[in-house]
Image (spheres, rainbow, N blue to C red):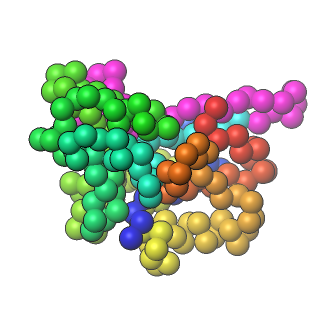
Amino acid sequence: MKRCLVIDLDRCSGCDSCVVACKHENGIDLGNYWNRVVPVGPTGTFPDIEQYWLPVQCQQCENPQCVHVCPTGASYRDEKTGVVLVDKDKCIGCQYCMMACPYGVRILNKKTNVVEKCTLCSHLTADGSGIPACVHNCCCGARYYGDLDDPESDASKAVAAALAKDSESVHHLPDPGDSHPATVYILSKKTAEWKGLV
């Protein structure tokens, strides 16, 4: 099982509704983010300008470095869903996981001294019936959620449709180690050249 997000950057407008939905649903403090949208570009010379918006949150890595370095077992990959989570009762706030994450998507809650991150709204999705708030509230329909190992999931269907149109339009963020990020990004060359996280 590989539950994750698929994000269609051809459709993303950079509106930040996913950021707001995430903060509202999860009660995230002012100044903290579990999800952020990074502008990539503009690049080129007028009138040939390219730009896209890259939403970045926990990549739900198959081999999460954050889990390997956690001294208490607070960071773990749920056996049932495959989602990387943090057990707040076990977290001692050492921040090793924050240093190990190649994507900089974990934050320390200074009020509780506990590390937090995107959970794919596990309180809504754990039983398989709900979807994350960012997916539900994406006004451009750019976000899909599901199990990539299930060809009938919305996420798998979005990837399959993208590959059928253009085999080079499916991307992952660069993997500097052996993390194998699961989050999938769709970006066709008609929109912009893929640059990853810059």
Task: Between residue 101 and residue 38, name the one nearer to us.
Answer: 101
Work out whether residue 16 or residue 2 is closer to the camera in this orientation and state it: 2
Q: Residue at x 29, y 22 (%)?
A: 30
Does 74 sit left or right of 89 as displayed?
Answer: right
Question: Is residue 3 in view from this perspective?
Answer: yes
As for residue 37 lying within the magenta part, the answer is yes
- Residue 89: x and y, percent? 12, 41
Q: Residue at x 24, y 62 (%)?
A: 126
Instruction: Describe residue 147's horizontal placement relative to residue 41 as left or right.
Output: left
- The quarter of the rendered structure image containing the N terminus is bottom left
The residue that appears at 44% across and 38% down in the rendered structure is 101
**Residue span colored magenta:** 23-50
Coordinates of residue 91 in the picture (x, y in percent)? 19, 37
Of 137 and 98, the residue lying toward us: 98
Question: Going by the picture, which residue comes out furthest to the left?
Answer: 89
**Residue 11 seen in the figure:** no
Q: Position of residue 83 (x, y in %)?
A: 33, 57
- For this rendering, which residue is in front, 163 or 173? 173
Q: Is residue 62 magenta?
A: no
Q: Position of residue 104 (x, y in %)?
A: 45, 33
